[in-house]
Image (cartoon, rainbow, N blue to C red):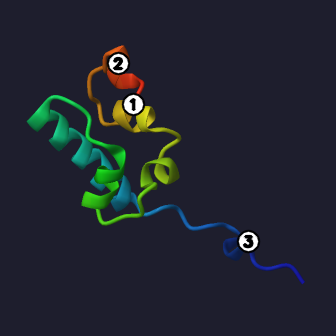
Amino acid sequence: LMAPFSQTLEPPPNPGRFRVVIHTLREHFFQYGAPPPMRSTCYLGHMAPHCIEELFHSANEAWQIAGLPEPNPEVSAYL
């Protein structure tokens, strides 16, 4: 027999994890004027080392969603 529809869907990711990453990116940028190392962003949020890739498609996408200004080309190479 088929499982009920509600059991076949995966639960949505925890929205709190998104907020922690966005807040950490903004906080670091406003304090230092540069993006933080992405692994340290995950570490500060008490998440897995590759949380950026799990939550967002890329670090650049997380940067844009955080509403931060377009990084220069040299910085973009590291995102």
Residue bearing the label numbered 3 = 5
Marks 2 and 3: which is nearer the front?
A: 2
Identified at 63% across, 67% down, the residue is 10
Three-letter code, disc 1? Tyr
Marks 3 and 1: which is nearer the front?
A: 1
Q: CA distance from mark 2 to mark 1?
A: 7 Å
Whether pointer 2 and pointer 1 mark residues with C-beta atoms closer than 8 Å, the reply is yes
- In the image, 79 versus 12, the foreground residue is 79
Residue bearing the label numbered 1 = 78
Residue bearing the label numbered 2 = 74
- In the image, 15 versus 49, the foreground residue is 49
Q: Does residue 77 appear left or right of residue 37 in this picture?
A: right
Three-letter code, disc 2? Glu
Q: Position of residue 54 (x, y in %)?
A: 51, 53
Three-letter code, disc 3? Phe
Q: Say which quarter of the image contains residue 37.
A: top left
Q: Say which quarter of the image contains residue 14.
A: bottom left
